[in-house]
């Protein structure tokens, strides 16, 4: 499986580039809905650049440890979304199949939003949905490893690889050039052990 690690510096540039593209479009939004957890960092940066204080979080579970978990995205809302009559921007880090973004966009439209647009850092051509705003097109499928899901992604990849999870994770981190020193090797081991513990429940 191909893995592309996106270091923090590059990830932040992608977020600001996405915000710039939205600004350049001349579009104006009243609220941002972010798809948690992957879209949280990009959405926060976009909300800052666009000056949008109204931000909502929708939790979606479709992918999980070691791959797809559900047949279709499981969406949950933990706060009231006041989007009726508003122009809304839905933000995530990537569209892979397009199912999660499509489901959330449809949900927001169903809540009476006037206009709903989507924005992501990476648009994979495997997606059934073409986002309104994106920075990079990914032509061949690759697992994009974002720095804000460091331990989770390493654990998922290591579990797929098999063998000792800690050894596999460190080997993968070196192979893809992941910035282990950001967390530190010892803290990373403790974090991965926490994933192992939770996975055994």
Image (cartoon, rainbow, N blue to C red):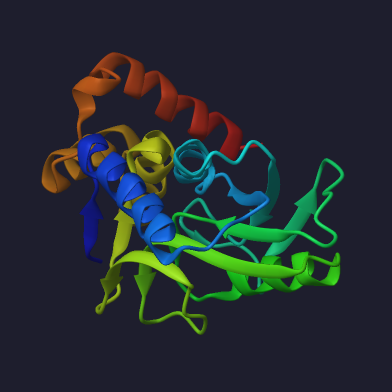
x and y percentages locating residue 149 in the rendered image = 42, 40
Residue found at the very far front of the displayed protein = 26
x and y percentages locating residue 3 in the rendered image = 24, 58
**82 relative position to 172: left or right:** right
Q: Is residue 162 visible?
A: no
x and y percentages locating residue 22 in the rendered image = 43, 59
Q: Quadrant of the N terminus?
A: bottom left
Q: Quadrant of the C terminus?
A: top right
**Residue beneath the point at 60% across and 59% down:** 90
| Quarter location, residue 152 | top left
Q: How many tags in the picture?
A: 0
| Quarter location, residue 185 | top left
Q: Is residue 164 visible?
A: yes
**200 relative position to 4: left or right:** right
**Residue beneath the point at 20% across and 21% down:** 181
* Of 51 and 55, the residue lying toward us: 51
* Of 10 and 45, the residue lying toward us: 45
| Quarter location, residue 124 | bottom left
In the picture shown, does residue 74 fall above or below 150? below
Residue found at the very far bottom of the displayed protein = 128
**Residue beneath the point at 51% across and 26% down:** 194
* Of 46 and 29, the residue lying toward us: 29
């Amino acid at each position: 499986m191909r893995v592309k690690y996106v270091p923090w510096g590059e990830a932040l540039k992608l977020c600001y580039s996405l915000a710039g593209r939205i600004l350049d479009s001349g579009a104006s939004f009243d609220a941002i809905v972010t798809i948690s957890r992957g879209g949280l960092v990009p959405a926060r940066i976009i909300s800052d650049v666009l000056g949008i204080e109204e931000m909502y979080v929708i939790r979606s579970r479709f992918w999980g440890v070691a791959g797809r978990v559900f047949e279709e995205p499981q969406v949950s809302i933990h706060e009231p979304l006041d989007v009726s009559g508003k122009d809304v921007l839905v933000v995530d880090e990537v569209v892979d199949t397009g199912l999660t973004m499509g489901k959330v966009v449809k949900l927001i439209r169903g809540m009476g939003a006037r206009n709903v647009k989507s924005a992501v850092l990476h648009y994979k051509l495997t997606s059934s949905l073409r986002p309104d705003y994106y920075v990079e097109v990914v032509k061949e499928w690759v697992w994009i490893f974002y720095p804000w899901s460091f331990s989770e992604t390493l654990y998922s990849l290591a579990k797929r690889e098999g063998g000792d999870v800690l050894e596999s994770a460190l080997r993968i981190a070196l192979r893809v050039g992941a910035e282990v020193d950001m967390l530190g090797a010892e803290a990373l081991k403790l974090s991965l052990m926490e994933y192992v513990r939770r996975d055994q429940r």
